[in-house]
Amino acid sequence: MSRAGAWRLGILGGAVALLELLCRLGAIKKITMIPPSEMALALGRLMAGPAMWPHAAKTFGNVAWAFLIAVLAGATIGVVLHALPGLRRALDPWLATWYAVPVFVFYPLFIVLFGMGDAPIIAIAFLFSVAAMTIATLDGLGRIPRVLRKTARVHRLTPIERALRIDLPSAFPYLLTGVKLALAYAFIGVIASEFILSGFGLGHEISFAYNNFDNRTMYGLMLFLLTAVVLINLVVQRIERRELRRRGR
Amino acid sequence: MKRRALDMLLVSVALVVLWQALHWRVGEEGLASPAATLRQIGEELESPRFWRHVAETAIAFGWALLYSAGGGLVLGLWFGFRRLAGEVAEPVLTAFASLPKVTLYPIMLLVFGLGLPAKVAFGAIHGIVPVVLFSMAAVRNLAPVLTRTARVLRLDARTTALTVLLPAALPEIVSGLRIGFSLTLLGVLIGEMFAAKRGLGFLIMNAIGLNDSGTIMTVATLLFAFAALANAALLALDRHLHHRGD
């Protein structure tokens, strides 16, 4: 293990141990936080029981839909905007301010448009993550070296050939960054919506446990959700790193 | 410049047309019309009750921004200057950046109680990560001669940060601040939507409960206008700083 890795493990381990100690000694009250060991126990109990899984399936399913639609739509919008520089220039400042819009306010509108159920939440998470993918696609297409475009012209590639052999491979690292961000934003969108608006899903379960002072369930669910998100992100990051290495960057 | 203004105008008109079309499609219940929203904006801006909510959010946002920008800058410069500390912190920070931090809001409430401090803390944890990551990367990418000179001159940490690192890394730091600004605002608003009795987030949540689409669109439009103006100003500063040397 690298020196930095050892330090990191030591500091994180030390923080958990300190938290455990403070909770056990009563310096942190039980109503505020339960000791990390009990959080792990609560997590184990939740995972063994049947109550949590339908909510987890709902949350992860919604994230998957929002993420998939956002990646496809974001890439398409990116390609279209790249092909129409005038439109792109006009929309650029709006893309840059996108994340300043509190998209949750559109929940009532989406309920009228799509009805009750999962669609409004997926729509909010989609709006949240589509901009990241669009920006990343534009970035990637904008940074294709000019020599590659000229080579494509010299070889008289058709637009489709050029897209597959030049544009896609060359923009790929940026697209991956977009995919990574879109996934993170899809999670944030779905869980925040469940938290404040919906009546189902892990986000709602956490907020429900909080409102009922059920700290065990709350911390167990938090641990489950955060561990799952970190693991998924690690997998995506590993794929990204492998791709970048393969491309010799 | 003239072209840009024209672009801006065209996109704005397109958005209003889209808004009006949606309004016709879903009716007053789902989405207030642009004209009605504009009228209500005029009324709200004259009502002291509305300004009390604005002040509540503004105070929370101001403090949160102070913590996320100030704290992020100090940590970022330190992590950038001390390579090992940066290597230790970076993976933890990137992992934290992509977490749905809403999950942690109940902890904030339990630790800080209902009220201003919890909102401030929640806004700050949203905004601080991009500021740290951008300033760290900026300091790492500085020409090594700068940090070496600081060491040769035996500058202390404070002087090094203020006279060498900060001015040289300023353009990237402003880019980080721009993202941190939006995220901090988002954090404060989500905090107010989840648990508050005052502030713009509470107004929105209350209006969602009452299905009062006029108020929703009024607050959303004003928030967007504020965020867009602040963002445009920071973006202009960003571009100005990035092209300073060329």
Image: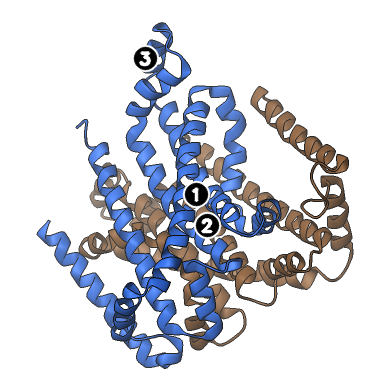
Chain colours: A brown, B blue
Q: Is residue A17 above or below residue B27?
A: above
Q: Are marks 2 and 3 on the same chain?
A: yes
Chain letter of disc 3?
A: B
The quarter of the picture where residue B215 lies is bottom left
User: Pointer 2 and pointer 1: residues touching (CB < 8 Å)?
Assistant: yes
- Report which residue position mark 3 lands on: B145
Mark 3 and mark 1 lie on one chain; the one further toward the N terminus is: 1
Judged from the image, the secondary structure of the residue bearing numbered disc 3 is: helix
The amino acid beneath tag 1 is Ala
User: Pointer 3 and pointer 1: residues touching (CB < 8 Å)?
Assistant: no
State which mark lies toward you, 2 or 1. Answer: 1
Horizontal relation, residue B220 to residue A48: left or right: left
Q: Residue at x 37, y 88 (%)?
A: B23
Q: Is residue B149 above or below residue A115?
A: above
The amino acid beneath tag 2 is Gly
- Report which residue position mark 2 lands on: B187
Mark 3 vs mark 1, CA separation in Å: 35 Å
State which mark lies toward you, 2 or 3. Answer: 2
Percent across and percent down for residue B110 are 71, 55
